Image (spheres, rainbow, N blue to C red):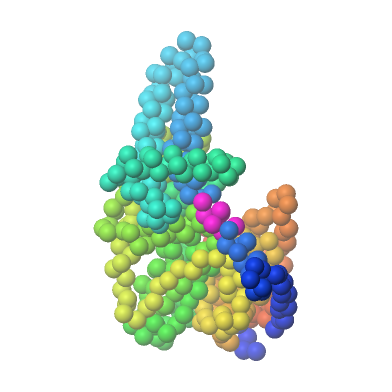
Amino acid sequence: MHSHTRSPTSSNHHLHDHDEDCAGGEQLRVTADDDCEASEQEAEANALMDVVAAFLSYKTFVLNSGIYRRLHHIDELSERHREIVSSLGTIDKIKNAEKLVRENYKFVLGLVHSSSVGEMPNPVDDPEEFKRWYQSFCESRTRAGSAMAKSSHMEKVLSTLKQFVRDWSEEGERERAQTYGPILQALEDEFAHVAPRDRGNIHVLVPGAGLGRLAFDICCRGFSCQGNEFSYFMLLASNFILNKSEVVNQHTIYPFVHQFSNVVSASDQLRAVRVPDVLPSEMPYAETARFSMSAGDFIEIYGAEDQRAQWDAIVTCFFMDTANNVLAYLDAMWNAMKPGAVWINIGPLLWHFDNIEGESSIELTRDEFVALVTKVGFVMEEQQFKKRISATYTANS
C-alpha cells in the first residue's frame, strides 16, 4: 500500500461553426461540438443497451454454454463411462446447477428492472407483459444488426455476480478486510484528529468504485465520499444494491454455479450467498456524511477544471493498473486533489491492457511506478509503504 501527499503547489478549445440554409430563409447554426455530443450520447445509449442485453441473456447463455453442453458431453460417453460418471453424482450436480441458474436469473431480472431501462415491465408482477417486452427488445436488436450479447460481456455478467459476494455478503468480509481494511485504517490514521461526526467536510474520492462498498464503508466512518465508476455492469448492479435494498440478506444468489473447474466439492460450487449483509440506507452519520456515485470516465470527469482541488483524499483499490496510460490517471488525480491531500493506494500492477490487440498500454514495474508518482509531484510517506499485502479477489473460499 502506498500513501502519497500532493505537494502544495488551460487549454484552449476551438469551436467550428457550420451554417446551412433552411426553408423560410432561416439559418440553422450547428456546431461541431453539438454533433460530437449527439454522437457520444448515441454511443453511450448503445453501450448501455449492450449491457442490458447481456444481463437479459444470462439464463440462455449459461444454460447453453455451461449446462446443456456438459450434459451432452456426458451423453456422448460410452455406456460404461456414463454409468461411472453418473454414480459419482456429476449428472445430478449439473441438473441442480441448472435450477440455480434459473434462480440467479430472477435476481438478474430484478437488477435490470430496478434501473427502469427501456420501460421494462416488472417480470414478477407481470410475467406475460415482460415476455412481450423481451421479445420486442430482441427483435429491435436484430433489426439494428446488434448481437443479443457479446461473449466478453457475458463474462462480465458472471464476474458481477461474484462481485456481490466480495462487496455485499458476510462471506466477502475476509476479502474486504484484506484490502479495504488497510485503506480504512490509513484514512482513520490520517484524520484521527477529527471525530467521525465532524468529518462530513472531508471529501474522499474512490475511482473504480465497483459496487460501492468501499465508498460506503468510508462514509460509515463519517467522511463524505463519492465513488466513480465507468462500467455499466457495475453501475446497474450498484444502483440495485445501494438504492433498492429493503432488508439485510434480501437476495439469495449462487455466484459460483458457473465454475466447473478447480472445485473441491459440489457443495462449494452450488452454495448460496445472501446479500446485502448490511442495509445501505442505514448509514451512520447520514446527517453529515454525504454518499454519492458518479458515472463516467475518471480522467474526463476529474481532470476537468470544475474538479480542480476539490478532494481531501483519493483512495484507489485495484484501480491503477486499469489505465492504458497511468500518467493520465495521475494527472487527473493531481488536478482533483487539494494541496496537501492524501492518496491511498492498494492493488497489483497487472496492467489490464497488456498484450490486448488494438489497445495502447504502458506497463511499469513497481519501482518504476513509485518513481513515476514522485516525479509527478507526490511525496511518498515511506513509513507507510508496505511491499506486500496478501489478498484474493472474488475467490470461492
Determine if the magenta segment contains residue 47. yes
Q: Residue at x 72, y 59 (%)?
A: 361
Residue 27: percent from left, percent from top: 66, 74
Q: Nearer the viewer, residue 98 or 12?
A: 12
Residue at the bottom extreme of this rendering: 9
Magenta-highlighted residues: 43-49
Determine if the magenta segment contains residue 84. no
For the N terminus, the quadrant is bottom right
Residue 68: percent from left, percent from top: 47, 26
Q: Residue at x 53, y 43 (%)?
A: 141
Q: Check the image and report above or below for 221 versus 35.
A: below
Q: Residue at x 30, y 62 (%)?
A: 279
* Chief SS of the magenta region: helix
Give residue 38's quadrant in the image. bottom right
Task: Answer whether residue 148 is visible to the viewer in this image.
Answer: yes
Task: Answer whether residue 274 is visible to the viewer in this image.
Answer: no
Q: Check the image and report above or below for 88 versus 184.
A: above
Residue 46: percent from left, percent from top: 56, 53
